[in-house]
Every structure is written in structure tokens, then in C-alpha cells.
Image: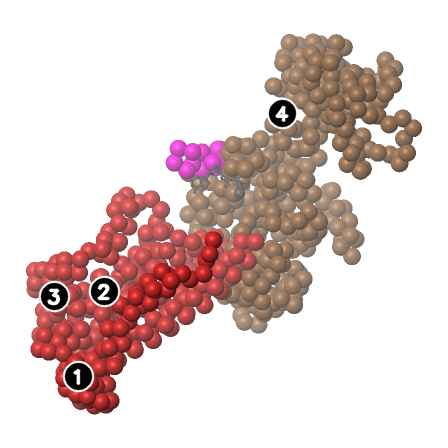
Amino acid sequence: MNRGPTWFNVTSLVLGFAFLYIPILLLIIYSFNGSRLVTIWGGFSTEWYVALVNDDQLLDAVWVTLRVAALSSAVATVLGTMAALALTRYGRFTGRSLFSGMTYAPLVMPEVITGLSLLLLFVAIGFERGYWTIVLAHTTFTMCFVAVVVQSRLVTFDRSLEEAALDLGCSPAKTFFIITLPLILPAVVSGFMLAFTLSMDDLVIASFTTGPGATTLPMRIYSQVRMGVTPEINAICTVMIGFIAIIVLIASIATKHQETVRRREEQAAAR
Amino acid sequence: MTKVRTQTIGAVRRTFAPWNDPTATPLIRFENVVKRFGAFTAVDHISLDIYEREFFALLGPSGCGKTTLMRMLAGFEEPTDGRITLAGQDLTGVPPYERPVNMMFQSYALFPHMSVADNIAFGPRQAGMAKGEVAARVEEMLALVKLQAFAKRKPHQLSGGQRQRVALARAVANRPKVLLLDEPLGALDKKLREETQFELMDLQQSLGMTFLIVTHDQEEAMTVADRIAVMNNGVLVQVDPPAAIYEQPATKYVADFIGDVNIIPCKVEGCFGTDLRLVTPLTPHPLQVTHAGEQKVGDEVVLAIRPEKLRISLDAPDAAAGNCFTGTIWDIGYLGDLSVYHVELPCGTRIKVSQPNLSRVVERPITWEDKVYVTFTPHAGVVLSQ
Ligand SMILES: Nc1ncnc2c1ncn2[C@@H]1O[C@H](COP(=O)(O)OP(=O)(O)OP(=O)(O)O)[C@@H](O)[C@H]1O
Ligand SMILES: [Mg+2]
């Protein structure tokens, strides 16, 4: 069988990538457009980036977004890891499969529904909407992503390592921090990264749960775009793309490295 | 060097038998211990005493509950019923990290993210030992298992045998009262295994600890242990020193499980003090057997005879030679030091006879299809109930 690339493979690959990346490429190129009109090329310029730095409203949105993402993903990582531990460890409690099903549900739940139900909750309990409600909402919806990532690592975790630590006189809590956590850390870190980017990207849930004074970057961009796309928006999007690309790159390099180390160690240990 | 030390150990061992001493108090006591997993009973009313400095082996087929018994002593499982005491202290409810018992895991369970030295230092550090002392203890342990050159390596950079030695060093580093070894030598080849068995015995003597080892290799159990417990389906079948287990098996199961044995179904025809006369379908002549048991005339019993307790010859023995079977050679297994003859009796039953190959050249060797006489003395076999 001929395993080399056929013209069909090559074409579909080129088309696929073109479809994915040409819009992004266009956006990046137009962010350096000298003209105020988005679709007409007016020469190379970085003026929109300068304008960006002077746009207080936009900078404020960036700041809110980063704070929300950092706080909600940190909390989601802790809670998600705890949920994953509970679901893999405590064998057969009643309603276990219901619980694990419920962890996955938010992954497939339409965001509008998650957003709307959270909004209803906040209204019902009279929680003043703003920065904190976005943080809470993001923690809720990113937590299950963390749980899923960590759970898949815990399934292959060798429990006898923990037993060995207990046997040698280490308390259960300490065992978790010096044996379990270091060994599942790569999964926890990728869970955190995932939660962070998800929180940064989110528009729908944030729009539902926000209140006056707390506008995230995606919300800001969306509301500005409704009044017409400006090169300034292109510039901020380019910065965001760069930022996310760097996070994803670091995360994938780190997990890849950790994964090879772990494979090697586990293969060696199983020998 | 090791040889000499092993000999002194042998000398010490011969006089070590606290289980026969009614005044001795056991270190570990299992009192009617039961462990159930759901409806399944893994350990069924086990009572067992293990004494200080004893090397005790648990032997039995896969799934008979050996690991479960050991995990209850280590504290990873709580008995469903009964209790375990260690040096008089009831262990019920004592968590694993507070028991003076350490375990060497079947999978070794070395911490993959720590170096060899850190693995060994783990126990002493948890015990709150001072930094300098920990370092000294690690040095000592590394020397003990001859791994000084590997202190900085990670477990994945070691060979299987080296990892096993690290696991051993880590388990003894805390100087536990009792060391539990769950099939510690399972991953080693035969030669390394034999070497390590002697190292283990050596270590046990020099550290003066109590060892409880799980194995399903009967030869290993015979080599290392002061006493062996044979388990089957969660119950203890027999607890005795190796020689007693081999020569005086308590049941047909033990006889069959340990070593090779010929099981000959018989019926008691006459009973004269300790002399029994047995009839068997295997030969027309009655068998004369010495046995101090409660057999009565008419009982259905089995005679268990080890292959090496039988004699084989091509010539008819004189009448005084005792019990005799006649048959033809069905197969011969040549093992170098021994030959194992499979003799087919007229009734179709096959029995095994092993003979040492005493000389290099034999005038008329026994070969296939030969008609042979198999003889044995009244003391050769053990009479067991069906
Ligand atoms: N956590 C558990 N839940 C249910 N059944 C169990 C559990 N642990 C052990 N068992 C059962 O108990 C029985 C004894 O298991 P155990 O591990 O003690 O066997 P073993 O004698 O050590 O066997 P092996 O020589 O194969 O290691 C087995 O039938 C096993 O299936
Ligand atoms: Mg086992």
C-alpha cells in the first residue's frame, strides 16, 4: 500500500488549514493596517497598538479578564482535582455513576443554559452581580474540565505507591502532598491551563452572569464589533492570539516532556 | 565470606524453636481472623502465632488469601472479625502509618520521582530522625544491599534486581519489628533468586527482625523459613517447620502441594499397634506400613510416598525387602543428578520413582519398557485420610 501523501490528502490538508488560519492571518495583517477602514489596505502601521495602550476601557477589560481567569482557574483546579480524587478513589458509593455522569454533563451542556441557570441562581439568592459572579460561574464550568483531565491520570495511578508511603509512617494528608500530587502534577497543570484559557475565551456565560462594572475582554470586543469592526479590535485580538498560543505551546511542551518521563519510569517500574 | 556466615546461621537456626516452648510469648497473634469481601471469604478463621526473630513463610496457591492476611497485619485492610495483636497490643483501628510493621511490596512501589537515597531515607524522615542520622542510616542501608554507587539514581535507571534491593533497603530502613515481604523475589531469575534468599536470611539474622514472607514457590519457602504455613482457600492447612511439612504432611492436600508425591489409595486391613496392613488395587500383595495414627480396620486411606523414598531395580527383590510393586518403565526423566522413572503398574496407574545417578557408567541401565520392581520400607510413606 502506498503510504505517501496523495494529491487528495494534500488538497484536503491545504484546504483545511486555509479555512482555519486564513481568517486569523487576515486579522493579524489588518491589525497593522494604516487605514481606519478595515477592508482597505492603507499601508503598514502600528498606530492601533499605540491606541490600544491608551484605551482605558479596553485595558480595564483585559485586567478584569486576567483576574477572573487566574482566580477561577486556580479554584477550579483545586475543586476539580478533589472531585477527580473522590470519583476515582471512593470505590462504590451509592450513586457513584450518577456523580461521574454529572461531572461530564457541563462539558456538553449548551453554554446558554449554564449561563442562564447561573443567572437565575444569582438573582434568586440576591447575589449582587459583577466580578465575583463571573468568577463563580467560571469556576463552576471549568471545574469539570479539570476533573476530567485529572481523573484520566488517576485511573492509571499505582495505589501501592501511596500504601508504601503510609506504611513507612507518612500520614495520609502528607502522602497526598509528597507522593500523589507530584506524580499527577502534569495533569493538574494542564487542567489549570485549560481552565485558564476557557475562562479567558468565554463570552456567553460571562455575559449572563456579569453586572455593572465588570466587563471582560470578549464582552468588550463583542460590543464594540456590533458598532463596526475597528483596526483596534484587530490589534487586541492579535495580542490575545499570541498570548493563548504561548500558553498552549508551553502546556503542550511541558505535558509532552512529563509524559515521556512518566512513561519511561512506569515502563521501567513494570519490568 | 557469605558461606561462612550462612553456616553460623544454620547453627543458630537448629536450636531456634520458640513455638515448642510453652512459656514463650508470641510477637504476632492472629486470633480467629476473618476477612470477607462482600459474600466472598478471603481469610477464614485463621489463628496463628508468630514469634520474635522468626522467619515465617506463607505458602499457598494463587488467590488463597496470603496477601490479604499480610495486608491486614500492615493495616491496609481491617479484619471483618477476630483481631490481630503485635507484642501484646491490639492492632484493631491502628492505621498503617502507626504500626511498627513495614512491607516490601510485590511491585516494589518505589517512588519514581525520588532518588534511591531519598526512597531509602523516606521512612527515617517520617519518623522524625535528625538529618545527620538519616544520612548515616541511608549509607548503612546502601552498604547492606551493596548499592552505594547508585544512591543518586532514579528507580527507572536501575535493573530489576537492583530495584528489588532498594525496595528491601527502604522497608528495613526504619528497623521495624516485623518486615512483611510479599513475593519479594518474584521478578528475579533462578540464580539471583537463590543468592538473594541467602542474603535475606543473613539480613534477618543480623538485624534480629521478624520476617513474614509470602511466596508460592515452595522451594523458596523451604530454604528461608523457620516455619511454613500452608494455606488453601483462606484456611491454614498446616503450620510446621519445613522438614515436618515435607516428611509429615498433615493432609493429602499438603503432601500434594509440597514437592512430588505418589498418592496410593488403600484400605486398612489389619492394625497391630503402629503397624498397619493395607490393601490396594495397585498390587495383589498387602502393604506393611508403620504409622502412629487413629486408623481403624476398614478405613479408606491414602498412602503418600515421595518418589525418592522408593527404590527401583531390574532384579526381583528377596521377600525380606518389604513392600513391592511390579511394573514397566513408561518414561524416564534425566535431570543430571537424578533420574525420574515413571513406572506403569498392571492396573494402569503410574507412579514416580527418583534415584540419584550415583555412577557415571552403569552396566545395565534401566530403560524404556523394562520390567522393574519398586520397593519401599514400612517407614517410607505417610498414611493420610482420604
Ligand atoms: N479488595 C478486594 N475485593 C474483593 N476481593 C478481593 C480483594 N482483595 C482480594 N480479594 C480476593 O480475595 C482472595 C485472596 O486474595 P489474595 O490477594 O490474598 O490472594 P493471594 O493468596 O495473595 O494470591 P496470589 O498468590 O495470586 O498473590 C482472591 O480470591 C481475591 O480475588
Ligand atoms: Mg498475593
Q: Quadrant of the C terminus of chain B?
A: top right
Give the amino acid at mark 4: Lys
* Mark 4–mark 2 CB contact (< 8 Å): no
Residue B162 x %, y %: 62, 58
A221 vs A183, left or right, is left
Tell me the element at label 3.
helix
Residue at which label 4 appears: B252
Residue A208 disc label: 3
Please report whichever mark, 3 or 1, sits nearer to the chain's N-terminal start.
Answer: 1
The residue carrying pointer 1 sits among few (fewer than 14), some (14 to 19) or many (20 or more) residues within 10 Å by Cα, namely few
- Discs 4 and 1 share one subunit: no
Q: Colour of chain A?
A: red
Compared with residue A32, is residue B273 higher up or lower down, i.e. above or below?
above
- Discs 3 and 1 share one subunit: yes
Magenta span = B33-44
Residue at which label 1 appears: A40
